[in-house]
Image: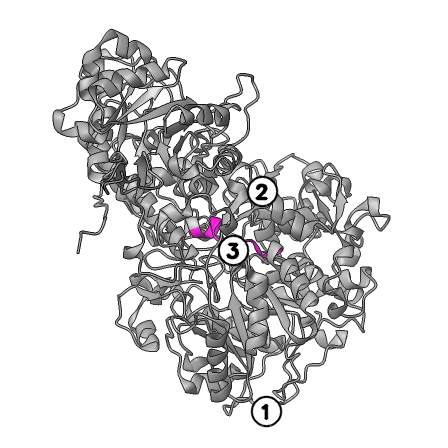
Amino acid sequence: MPDRYHIHTTNTPGQFHRIGKFGGIDWREDCSRCTNCVKPRCCFDVYQHESAHNRSPQASMQTLYECKACFSCVQGCTKGLLSLSANPEFLDMGDDYWKPDIILSNWTQADSGKIPVSGAGYRGRFHGPGFDSIWTDMSEIVRPTRDGIHGREYISTSVDIGLKPMRLNFSPDGKLSTESSSLMELQLPAVLDVPAWPVRQIRLARARAIAAKELMTLALVWARDAAKLPQDLLPYTVPILSGDDLRGDAELLELVRNMAQLLDSPDVPEMAKTVRARKPQAILSVRLTLTPSAADRILDLSRLGFKVFHLCADLQGCERTGSRHSGRHIKDVLRDIHGRLVNEGCRDEITLVVSGGIALAEHMAKAIICGADLVAVDTALLVSLGCRVCRNVHTLHIDGGLRSAGSLSCECPAEIGLQDSEYAARRFVNLMGAWHSQLIEVLGAMGIREVRRLRGEMGRAIFMEEIEKEAFGDLAPMPLKQDIA
Amino acid sequence: MTTIAEVNIPLEIPKTPGHSDEPQENVQREVRPVPERYRNAIGKYRVTRLASCIACGRCAELCPEGVHIRPEGYAYMLRPQDHRCIGPACAKTDHYCIRQCPVNALALRLNPNVECLGDPRWTGDLILSTWYQAETGQVPPPHLEYRHGDSGGGFDRMRFKFEVPEFGTSPHFAAPEKKRSAKNASPAGIDTSLDLNRRADGRPQVHIDIPVYGGGMSFGSVSIHTILAKARAAVAWNTFSCTGEGGYPDRLKPYDDHMITQVATGLFGVREETIQRVRIVEFKYAQGAKPGLGGHLLGDKNTPAVARMRGAVPGNALFSPFPFHSVYSVEDHKKHLDWIKEVNPHCLVSVKVSTPTDVDMVAVGSYYAGAHIVHLDGSYGGTGAAPDIAKKNIAMPIEYAVPKVHKFLCAEGIREKITLIASGGIRTAYDALKAIALGADGVVIGTAEMVALGCVRCACCESGRGCPRGIASTDPELIELMGLDWATQRLINMQNAWHEQMVDVLRKLGMSSIRELRGRTDVLCYMK
């Protein structure tokens, strides 16, 4: 029996300033020294931990932020001196899409690789834009079409990437005439992508490659960074090549092992020829910016023989329209592109990878439901290293890489890119381990045995627009700005 | 003091076959004030008194809410009881202490603690107003939004037409001073009771006085005081509470007639004897907060007492697998129900399912398998521990499931033969009424009761020793944070406030019974 796929996570506490949600405020001047103090009675020992932390000469000057906001101390203090406050630094993190709670959740997942579990019901908004308007289905008593229930360890999360021949052809003498296909099986429907904005790269590239090896998936790296990676990591990396790269330094092609990614441009067919000449077996994918015309471009390129496409949406998971207004969310774009490819009869030949806006494990599952084969994780990897998605001046993609921290004008509060690659890789593995377990939860609940079958399974998801109409279509409408007493 | 006897609801419980052999304890349905069990109550506003206060006592004379107190014989004022303050609205009255303090020693502002309390689904206002209802048994004052949360969808975007001036009805609920009086709000003759057996299959009728009963919370997930308080409140209101799947503690025997016992996938603590004791048995196929995933009690909460009840080893995490591996079809399901019906020939059978896309088919299947009650548990419901990804993403919220199932059962012509119960995100009396207007017969509540007992929704029920406030804990020390009598009375009070609101809404809608409201979507409007 082959080994089952398992992600080995290791506890790896973050080496960055962690910003917590709640803080206690303590007005000591009125304290009556009543000795009924509620602080030692905190059932999470928050006050003890903080006091030990403050006394420790090794500890940083930062607050611990362990408070869970249970209000026991606030309500129990004899003189009512304690109160709680939401940490403004926490509320300021991220943006409308990368919400503080998402960032905190990814930090925690990267610490231990465990699924976030909590008590009490769901706490967020009823629905929202993008992925928040989809609910995944779950199996129930009677479901004749489903795969049946399996132990979690039997649920497969592997996906194929590359050229998928639809049938085998044989010559009249019975010999196989179909070219042997170059197809890779990844054990995780996620590849590790380059950061979406300029970040000091080289240590991160190495970390992604190490993590990809451990996770049995692929890491995307800029070709020039790939040149600095050790040889044993190259099979797990996909160099991203531009036309200039190929014209400037043909030796970069030596870095290509199983797969290469070409930046989309009118010269892509030429570039492909150049690569194929040196590496005939390599899988070629095209990295497209997700624009409203992406579906047409995919169809054009697929007729030219390209079968793997990486669609890069913006940081919020939307199309780039070129104007100030962002376009549709990937959940809609993917459904559209998937539908077009199905109608053209070529969906199964093509592998769609999507990146941008994949912030949580549920986004991975939902993007696949909407039609992607796999996702590429970019910003979430930075978040696992302490990034707060502030996108302040992370100016240059520094080639030297191994320069000391002091010589870099770093404005990144989490010092992304300065961490040790092994540490960063462990955090990446943990994060992906937690996401993988959550994907299995979703698949298990749906009664689906492998993630390949999740692709485009829109009938097994509940879309807000449709269900609103079905459930509330007969209710009298009320103007939105209605002043309700 | 308002007792329910004044509002003409029968207190006598009709004796039917299937009742327990154990002597049953009666609990008075009586509203009594039960103050906060912590020293410092949290209110929406904070009133601060500066050191320049001359303790003239003027504020204490003025404030009808009891914010300012100077006890007899004391030279100084007590710390302001600011949880009673009604806030800036008071400025319009002639007893606004801030303005009338001769030395300007008082200040009023929003309580900064409240921004850490609650979330979009359970806003700080909803938590505070539930506490108010549990404390006083009355409808909350207007400065607290007690009817809906701020989640931006579902019930929170739904209003009864009488709440909206454009629909040509009263601009607001009854005037505030009338609202506080139960007599005004509960005219005789408005009936909130429900019959749960609609199959006419020869099994006894089960009648509940309010269209609400308590959800399953197992021994292990919550403390024994919480379980007993829920059961006692159910006795007082002639309705039901549910054991959950952690077994049937002996201390519940005096309340057998008001208990539902659960048969869930782990079969923890399920014995023939427990099934024979009750009037309703519930099959838990799935739970809204973690549909398709089964149950999970973390090892820390599996104390020796819990383990004994469940027939398990203490300290081990306990999983209820998903699903029932003996049920893969309607026929299997029927066999399951027949088994229970055979064991207890007098009980009704309820089927608790979550809300997949084909929940309507599941409901029909349950009817044909012989269920009396279909209990839909929506995805935003409570839990003692669930993966965050499941709570948010798997299966649909109850607001969508109820009309879907109701319409389908009507189209199948079996709507009048089955009782449809909704749960999973019923936070307020208004949520309950809206669920009924969408097509449910009644509702099951869980989190609302926990909040009435002092839950702040810190979401730590699953961790270590469990609930820091002693509600969902099995830790011997934390359990003692909450007394049984206190907890029972809080739940009775909250139910009274809900009942007043239900009667009031029915009166405004010109209906004489809660049963008339079912499926009346024409009384609702929706912010599209």
Residue B321 vs residue A402, the one in the foreground: B321
Magenta residues, dominant SS class: helix
Residue B254 appearing in the image: yes
Give the residue number, with chain letter if any, for mark 3.
B379
Task: Name the residue beneath numbered marker 2.
Answer: B46
Horizontally, is B501 left or right of A44 in the view? right
Discs 2 and 3 share one subunit: yes
As helix, strand or loop, the secondary structure at mark 2 comes to: strand
Tag of residue B17: 1
Q: Nearer the viewer, mark 2 or mark 3?
A: 3
Return the residue nearer the eye: B61 or A431: A431
Please state which amino acid type lies under the numbered disc 1. Pro
Q: Nearer the viewer, mark 1 or mark 3?
A: 3
Q: Residue furthest left?
A: A231
Q: Are marks 2 and 3 in contact (CB under 8 Å)?
A: no
Q: Is residue A78 above or below residue A102?
A: below
